[in-house]
Amino acid sequence: MHDMADNTRAEPTAPDADGRRPRRGPPLARAVESCVALFQRKLRAGELGSLPVVLVLAAVWITFQSLNGNYLSPRNLSNLSVDIVGTGLIAVGIVFVLLIGELDLSVGSISGLAAAVFAVLNVNNGVPEWLAVIVAVLAGTVAGTVQGFSFAKTRVPAFVVTLAGLLTWNGFMLYVLGSSGTINLDEDGLVALLTSYYFSNDGAAYGLAAVGAGMYFLMSYQDRRRRKAVGMPHRSLRGTAVRTGVLAVIAFAGAYELNRFQGLPLALLIFLVMVAGLDIVLRRTRYGRQVYALGGGVEAARRASLGVTRVRTAVLAVSGTMAAVGGLFMASRITSVSQSSGSGVLLLNAIAAAVIGGTSLFGGRGTTWSAVLGMLIIQSIASGMAITSTPAAVQFIITGGVLFAAVLIDSLSRRSQEAHGRA
Amino acid sequence: MSTPPLLALHGVCKRFGVVEVLTDIELEIHAGQVVALMGDNGAGKSTLVKVISGVAPADKGAIEWEGRTVHVRRPHDARDLGIATVYQDLALCGNLDVVGNLFLGREISRYGFLDEVEMERRTRHLLERLTRAIPDLRAPVVSLSSGQRQTVAIARSLLGDPRVLLLDEPTAALGFEQTTEVLDLVDRLRDRGVGVLLISHNLGDVKALADRAAVLRLGRNNGFFDVNTASQEQIISSITGATEDSSRRTAPHEARW
């Protein structure tokens, strides 16, 4: 999935140069050779993409599996896939904010506020669930829009505006909850089902895997066909097939594991669909292009007559909305809302997930998929620590180390890119 | 009566806070003509470019397009008129690739989604006209050399087939070969009837390329010259202020080229 980030790029090392290049050795050897060349080129250009993240994830999984044989069991992996959703959705919103080179500190409070609004409306006041969900999500959108507009108009850095927001929305949440304390959600309600429903039919998970791989192939194929038609460089059919194959293997392996437990979790389905949808918004629409442009240079964007205020407001609105959606999933996981909802390490985990997954703190680089990858790493470590009954202190230290390494890689690759330009 | 100039500025003033950066500026750009805008550092050259391109609209004065008064309040207004600008700092987004930068603010869409293939095709087509060594169109601009970035910035300005092109020190950061390439390009644009305003410190470039030279000094007009007849010393003394008084008095007359 992470490879989608550059699927329009025609790799000069792709085997479509076959005709011009002398054949050396068997196809496999040539394929390996071209992969190595591609890797070296990307390393030099400072655009490693998701590779380091995937390697870290593999290392984490191998380590914990060797410490405890139950770590990679279907049950644990299935739980892991549901546990990442709440914070992961919030991290997707954070990716938007990081892309314009800002930071949103209010997402934790907004997620708590949304959960509280839902619980009070539905449980205490008997508002139908669907309506309460809509109001709760809109509360997040409104909170984000207010922050975004003040940030865009006053030009006070977003992290200051949202720091004020962190306190304000937390206060709103306590006010909404009033004397309720802890509110338990309906165990069979819509929101509770968000994280407790599994598609027990094997076909669901395999179907999702097939649809994902199929869509990827179709889009790549379509792109290739149009490029070929106008005589532009394009990726070879074999390259597309190999990429689709790798994606399909990962997807079907995941589906197989999920089916060995309870099937495809609804939460995971929603998460993946939202991430894929927002990824398309960011990389394939005019609005997304404007978000990236703001991260690359506000002045350049302004001179290209972009509506800077509008885009900034919209970005924080997206972040607030995603925080609210994530807050509902977090409430669903424990089927209750309390005064501590949305507090603690939630905010830090969401930001860390986006950064660990490869979204740059300096703005302008990253995709929504980085929220998935980063959250997988953070939750994998947390789950491994729990399964090997390691104290939480160690978990924090290790997650902190991974975050530091991610920031380091980000900063180094950025510098390498600039040095590359001076050559 | 001759045809009105493509672009004319009359009595344009611009102040930043209490500082009057431009005072009563007069300027005319005709089709198929290269006007060099010269002046010392801080004379107001870049500010004038920003006034014309709508980034920093004028406080007072009139801008005329083909003889009728127009209002340029946003970069969008200037672009709609057919004024394109290459800024001194290029104003590129380093994280976007070449195609993304070229089409920033005027992306081509297909069924509501960006049409990357069409944009890349047009980019390639345009760059092939401008330069021999086409950079990797999908590499982020930050990883290109400064000459390549300059080419990208110029290519972007030409995308909408502008009728007036503002170039703010286009050759300052370039080597000899790339400078020649840019100057050749400006020459070809003039032949196609584009009016060019060229800001430059390099008198050699101006002599080689420009038809007219307008000199600014401390935010005011300080003389207009026909580059072919005026001597180098005349222009330099006007830039440095040695002929400040006399030329300011004569400016209105000479302004009627």
Image: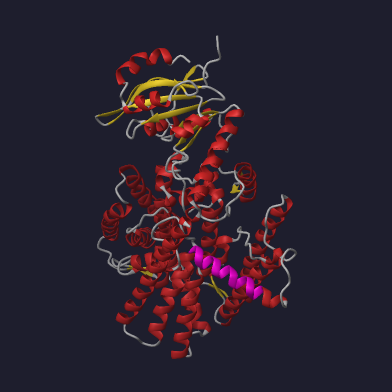
Instruction: Determine whether A192 is above or below A389 in the image.
Output: above
Residue B148 colored magenta?
no
Image quarter where the N terminus of chain A lies is bottom right
| Residue at the image point whose x is 32% and y is 59% from the top | A105
What percent of the width, then of the height, locates residue A29?
A: 67, 77
Instruction: Determine whether B249 is above or below B41 in the image.
Output: above
Depth check: give the residue in front, A25 or A166.
A25
The reply, left or right, for residue B104 in relation to residue B200 is right
Depth check: give the residue in front, A274 or B11.
B11
What percent of the width, then of the height, locates residue A388?
A: 39, 88
| Residue at the image point whose x is 66% and y is 60% from the top | A220
| Residue at the image point whose x is 38% and y is 48% from the top | A145
Q: Furthest residue to the right?
A: A19
Q: Quadrant of residue A171?
A: bottom left
Give the magenta range. Answer: A31-48
Depth check: give the residue in front, B253 or A2.
B253
Asked if one can make out residue B26 in the rendered structure from this viewpoint, the answer is: no
Instruction: Determine whether A75 is above or below A229 in the image.
Output: below
